[in-house]
Amino acid sequence: MVLRWVVNAGLLAIPIGGTVGALMGIDAHRHATGQAPLFSGGGGSGSGSGSDSSGSVPPGGSGSTTHNGVANTMYCPKTPYGITPETKGQSFTLNPNPWGVTGDTVGALCMNVTTFDNGTYATKNTAPEFSVTWQYDPSLSTQPVHAYSNVMIDDGLPISLEKIQHMNVDFHWTYGVGNTPAEATNEAELTAASVNTNVAIDMFMSHEEKVKDSSDYTHEVMVWFGKFGPATYVLGQDGGVVATKELNGTIFNLYSGRNGNNQWVLTWLTSDSSNDPEAKGKTTETFTGDLLPLITDLYSMTGEAYPSKSDYMGIFQFGTEAFHSSTNVTFWAPKFSVDLQ
């Protein structure tokens, strides 16, 4: 396996087996803060198993095992950390991205990434499979989000919005209580565990082609496919639904508001109907289709809240925002592909 490693001294040293395994990073944090351990028993071993398996510890202190050309690597950083696997198709960067974690944060997060040694995936636009297991107590600050773990497009950005003819996506995800991926999302279990999180595509746009930081973009356009817990608030939801769009049988409702960086945040939320005053949303684990109409519809709306077709898209990501949870939960994305044409 060849990976372009980004060295980060904040990584926890964790050897793993071939699955998500026991999150010893969270255990270590809880032990250091005097809390009861979340797990008992050993985690995976970095040595792997079988004659065709191998183990390694990449720079930064993570752990990786390889079996039959398939590598599973776990990352438990305390700060944002980019992972860009070698690929013969479109380049992606995966990031656990615990950007909202502070010195008094209680909890932790680990991302597991599955890569192929030959750099070949289902399609040239398919990202590596990944999962994220996390647990955070509620934040005491005004910033409730601890992390946005995601996969990001590397190629072809920034791009003028008027040059995009299609924004084809194809994905499948699940959310479950525990340390391993769930076959399906059980909303009742997530509610019982006080899980507050979402699943979303996140795009940043600006009048300028080159923008240094995400906080410098003028517009953030999100598409939420899952919304769990009362703390997972859609900016602008108190103002009600601004617009509604149906794509491939899925209803999307638009909400508009400003964030702490004074950026306009436009959020399309999947829903059962156009009448969703409380922005409850509808869990949508799979979607295949062209999302571009969610962008082009904004061009006809007046006011500075909306981007124009002459603007540029500089960032396109897919992942989950971790607010808080009473126990460990796992987000799993076994399939995600995006093709900007």
Image (tube, grey):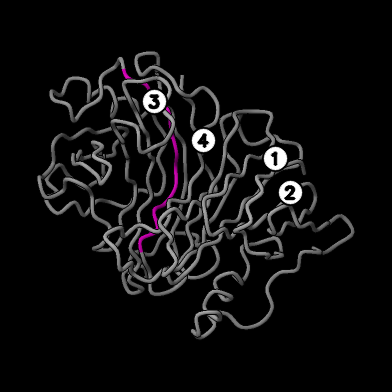
Magenta stretch in the rendered image: 311-323
Is any atom of residue 251 visible in this view? no
- Mark 1 residue crowding within 10 angstroms, few (<14) / some (14–19) / many (20+): few
The residue beneath circle 1 is 4
Of callouts 4 and 1, the N-terminal one: 1
Whether residue 249 is in magenta: the answer is: no
Cβ atoms at labels 2 and 3 below 8 Å apart: no
The quadrant holding residue 176 is bottom left
Residue 235 percent location from the top left of the image: 21, 47
Where, by quadrant of the figure, is residue 29 drawn? bottom right
Q: Is residue 317 magenta?
A: yes
Which one is in front, 273 or 146? Answer: 146
Q: Nearer the viewer, mark 2 or mark 3?
A: 3
Return the disc, 2 or 3, that comes first in the chain's sequence.
2
Mark 2 → mark 3, Cα distance in angstroms: 33 Å
The type of residue carrying mark 4 is: Ser
What is the spatial separation of the Cα atoms under label 2 and label 1, in whole angstroms? 16 Å
Q: CA distance from mark 1 to mark 3?
A: 25 Å
